[in-house]
Image: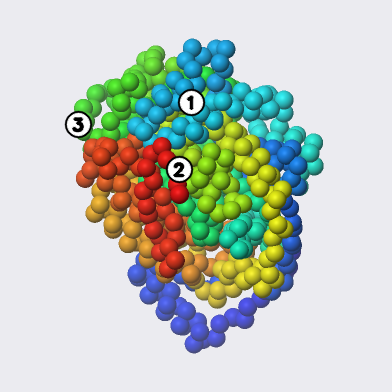
Amino acid sequence: MTAPTEKPAPNRREFLALSGATAGAASLGMAAWGQNFVEVDVDAITNTDFATDVLVIGGGMAGLFAAVKAHDAGASTMIVSKGRLGSSGLTPFGKGFFVFDTDVETDTIDDFVDTVSRSALGTSNPAYTRQMAEHSMARAADLREWGYFDQTLSNRPFMKPIEDRDIPLLERVHVTHLIKEDGKIAGAAGFRNDAEETVTIRAKSVILCTGAGGFKPNGFPLGDLTHDGTIMAYEIGAKVTGKEWNDGHMTRSDNPAACYDGWGDMFERVPSTNGVEVHHDLGVDLNYTAYMTGNPVAGGPGAQPSDGDTIEVEGGPQTPEEFQRDFGAPGGDGEGGGPSSGEGGAPGAPPPGFEPSANVGGASAGMAIHKSEGLVPFDDRCASNIAGLYAAGDALGSHMSGGIYTQVGSSLTGSAVQGAIAGEAAAEYAETADTPVIQDVRISEIVDEILAPLRLDAGYGPAWVTQTLQGIMIPNFVLYIKKASMMTAALAYVEELRDHHVPMLRAANMHELRLAHETRNMILSAEMKMRASLMRTESRGSHYRLDYPDMDDVNWRAWINIYQGTDGSMQLEKQPFDTWPT
């Protein structure tokens, strides 16, 4: 490690100026502004350059299959992960793997696709729903061969196919930039979390398996997911979708900020497979109850409150009659319940964290329904509108289940299936693509952008800006139970953070550098969520508006796509259901 750079102590005039500015900032609620005492020699940070045919960014379920299948298709392949393979993001948390076994299921895949569409109120993309079911058994067989269903942790079974194929793996590398040249993807760049080094990777094709993200809420295993891939792709011209949908996970009211206390039983489970069990889950019905009556509320649709008294609440989000269930009162048998969002569990039991008990919301604030947000797919092979750029899993807005949770275990299965398909498609593209040429001056510009927070003499601490963002976005009456006045106000705050605070995010070391880039990504994602939620003037699935409480099939049988205009502004457009973008 390079020795920290010593800065001379400020003279009396500088000290008084800094103290006065700090005191003034504190009186205005901006105490996080301060001098940047940099702990590294920024000018001594080195850059390491790599090259590959297919670059996979992300080390979860989608990233694993993308790398394996791209390699098996003949492409030189590399994986880069912000964390550890199989041990970061939501992969360690998911334990249920959906398998459509035609020898067991009485319904056909056509029936299954139609049922999911009914639950999703038309928001699902049948091509990706069908794909997930058709390939589920093959992907489960791969995982079984690697030992995935034999242990609680994913790292060792994930490492087996990677080591067997000698696929290069860079862990603890935070990718911050995608590089586009001549209208095509050309690579990516970032930095090591644990070393004073930037990294650039030239690639013919890139697959984003970076997951979704949130606002680093408490009580849910989402802290290292901050929509990095989505924002990187958006900034080079990719279209983004699904930002108005909301994940409704809660956490237990006892020790609500303790992720393991609320969800530890998920991490301790051995993964298992499950069959068809289509639901309409994790919308915002409990958020509405909390809005109308106060917190805490009991978990699970139809559950009784923790004191045993029934709460009658009129209005609010509606579940189609076909998919209404009752998790039962506390101490009841929970008939008709079942796990949701691909987490696994015993049939007939509520999902972990959704037992009839006192729960509080916002645990996954900032995340949408699995597979509903991310890059807009331009075909059924995970391609984006940028040549050579693909996405899979929660980084792809495939709307596999639409704007609501529908199929138990589909999240992990969808990631595995989409990763494999994207890997093969990227390898096919790379076979005929030219080796990208990135000028040294462009690399230097990108490195300067990566390291900019380290070069500031003073600025805002990223942790404080993140806390400010959380205070703006996480309240139930902003993010979940929506109305135009509150969203417009929240958007104004978010724009202020975007325009004034992001350029002045400081970092003293590589850890804070990661926080600075993550904070910036979360702010842009918050802007997307507010703009898409304002645009969708109806209530459907996990998107609920107090001022537009009904579903509008005349005007809103469409997804919302977001893209960057030529002037840098955020633009939105409709894409009708059951169509591909043009």
Q: Amino acid at mark 1?
A: Val
Nearest to viewer (mark 2 / mark 1): 2
Q: Amino acid at mark 3?
A: Glu
Q: Which residue is mark 1?
A: 408
Residue 40 appears in the figure: no
On residue 314, the disc is 3
How far is mark 2 from mark 1, CA to CA? Answer: 26 Å
On residue 278, the disc is none
Nearest to N terminus: mark 2 or mark 1: 1
Residue at image coords 72%, 25%: 145
Horizontal side of residue 532 vs 151, given as left or right: left
Nearest to N terminus: mark 2 or mark 3: 3
Q: For mark 1, does the 10 Å Cα neighbourhood hold few (<14), some (14 to 19), or many (20 or more) residues?
A: many
Residue at image coords 49%, 70%: 504
Q: For mark 2, does the 10 Å Cα neighbourhood hold few (<14), some (14 to 19), or many (20 or more) residues?
A: few
Q: Is residue 538 above or below residue 94?
A: below
Q: For mark 3, does the 10 Å Cα neighbourhood hold few (<14), some (14 to 19), or many (20 or more) residues?
A: few
Q: Which residue is mark 2?
A: 580
How far is mark 3 from mark 1, CA to CA? Answer: 29 Å
Viewer-closest of 305 and 324: 324
Q: Amino acid at mark 2?
A: Trp
Residue at image coords 65%, 59%: 186
Nearest to N terminus: mark 3 or mark 1: 3
